[in-house]
Amino acid sequence: MKKKFNLKEKIQQFRAWRERPREVAPMSQEEHECLNCHDHYTGRFCPRCGQAATTSRFSMKVAAENFAEAYGMGERGMFRTILELILRPGYLILDYLRGMRVSYYAPFKMFFLLFAISTLVTHGLNIKGQALYDDSETSVQNLEKEIDEKSGSTEEQDVLEIEGETFKFSDRTKAIVYKIFDRMERFEKRFPSINTLILLMIVSGFLYLFFRHCPKIPDLRYPEFFMALLYIANMYTVYSIVFDFFCLSKLSSYSIFLTLIPLKQMSGYSWLRTTMKTVAASLIMFGLLVLLIILGILVIFLIAKRGA
Ligand SMILES: [Zn+2]
């Protein structure tokens, strides 16, 4: 008789599997002779030179593996890591932070590889075969146009009002602002991955304030949290690559909310607390950003005024 499919039981099994640390298969007792230094040993690698016990004559498969390795895809379960980033991201991070390093694809390497794939997909390697985000005209040029149009039509819109006092923007002020934005944009275009890493450092800094005493890791260190966020960014990139490939740009942007899943799983906070902490960190970050921009504009304005 066929056993009845029990959904509740399956979900429970999945949950238990998700939370259990990854298990490494027991080692075989088979004896090997190293083809490099002819030592006899048991295990997967030669204890003297480190050559793999599976080393064999070249076949198409071995040659292909060699090729893949040159591009950083040959080892340490790239696909397993991606699969676990989708099924149990927070628990994978806990495994990794607690010392299971070799079982998983290294987060930095994964970041650069996924970044490259993502760039290919958004620049045309998708079902429509076209670039998803139009970058023929830079946003600085747009900004420049917008401000010029405004100042062309009415003079008054070029004015900044702070506590009853009005400051008029001179062309010199505008020129400085353009220059700064232009430099920032050029840096972003030339080193997009470094730009993202810097952004990740800032975001993780604010989030760290709220997660450093979490139940699962009460003495969480900032570098550990940064590595965790790198994996979370990789998870997000995996989702956005898939959505971008099918040209579902909306879903691609919304998948940023999926980052709450690993944050909850790795911290051990409830859904509500995880969400509240993330929202609080974001509010503080954006508040400070707005404050910095206002301060920056004021400083530029004063410098320009003095120079004029
Ligand atoms: Zn050897």
Image (spheres, rainbow, N blue to C red):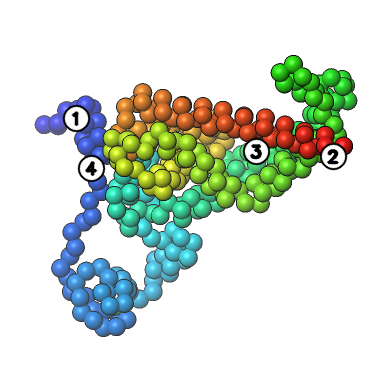
In this rendering, the label closer to the viewer, 4 or 2: 2
Farthest residue toward the top?
164
Residue at 32% of width from left, 74% of height from top? 51
Q: Earlier in the sequence, mark 3 or mark 2?
A: 3
Residue at 28% of width from left, 35% of height from top? 215
Q: Which residue is mark 1?
A: 9
* Quadrant location, the N terminus: top left
* Quadrant location, the C terminus: top right
Give SS at disc 1: helix
Residue at 14% of width from left, 31% of height from top? 3
Neighbourhood count class around disc 4 (C-alpha, 10 Å): few under 14, some 14–19, many 20 upward: few
Ligand 1, what quadrant?
bottom left
Residue 196 image offset from top left, x and y in percent: 56, 45
Q: Which residue is mark 2?
A: 307
Count how many numbered circles sit on residues in the image.
4
* Alpha carbon separation for disc pair 4 and 1: 17 Å
Give SS at disc 2: helix
Q: Which mark is residue 20?
A: 4
Q: Earlier in the sequence, mark 4 or mark 1?
A: 1
Q: What's the amino acid at mark 4?
A: Arg
In this rendering, the label closer to the viewer, 3 or 4: 4
Would you say 246 lies left or right of 59 here? right
Farthest residue toward the bottom?
38
Q: Which residue is mark 3?
A: 133
